[in-house]
Amino acid sequence: MSALSNITPLYRLSAPNHPSSPRVCRETVAAVLQATGATALVDTARLLVSEAVTNVHRHAEHTRAIHIDVLVHDGAAVIAVKDNDPDGVPLRRPVNPHGEGGRGLLLVEELAYRWGVTWLGGEETDRKQVWFELRAPE
């Protein structure tokens, strides 16, 4: 057995902050999960990645590139969506039942095993990541 077989795979994706990025990112993350055998997580990952990347596109307009890390291990995945807007705090907004937006973090709260926001860059924070963990149903 190779020493590399004990390493938990981490996949990285970078995409421009562009209207097409939610679709491209969700399908790329879905492909990673399918290729690593985490097929039970694909549908939820597609939805949550799409919501997180859409939030970056809508609310972090100064972010030129969106970076996504996908860590797959033992039927679970941790997905982190990073942007360059350390001041924009992701907040759940009141949902307008007739509106099209405002449900992203509600969906993350409901569908992820756990989730959070981490600020990156030390004392001089220059970016943040919204991350969520998905686990296969038992």
Image (spheres, rainbow, N blue to C red):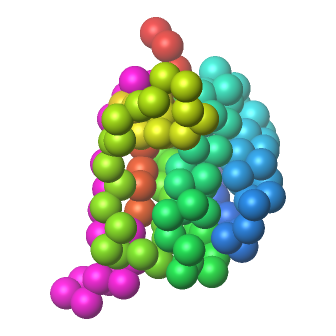
**Image position, residue 50 (x, y; %):** 64, 44
Looking at the image, which residue is at 67% across and 26% down? 43
- Above or below 63: residue 123: below
**Image position, residue 95 (x, y; %):** 41, 31
Looking at the image, which residue is at 46% across and 9% down? 138
**Image position, residue 124 (x, y; %):** 25, 90
Is 108 in the magenta?
A: no
Looking at the image, which residue is at 56% across and 74% down? 61
Q: Nearer the viewer, residue 16 or 100?
A: 100
- Above or below 122: residue 54: above
Is 121 in the magenta?
A: yes
**What residue range appears in magenta?**
110-128
Does residue 7 appear to the left or right of 22 in the view shown?
A: left
Looking at the image, which residue is at 49% across and 23% down? 97
- Above or below 44: residue 1: below
The answer to whether any part of residue 21 appears in the image is yes
- Above or below 132: residue 58: below
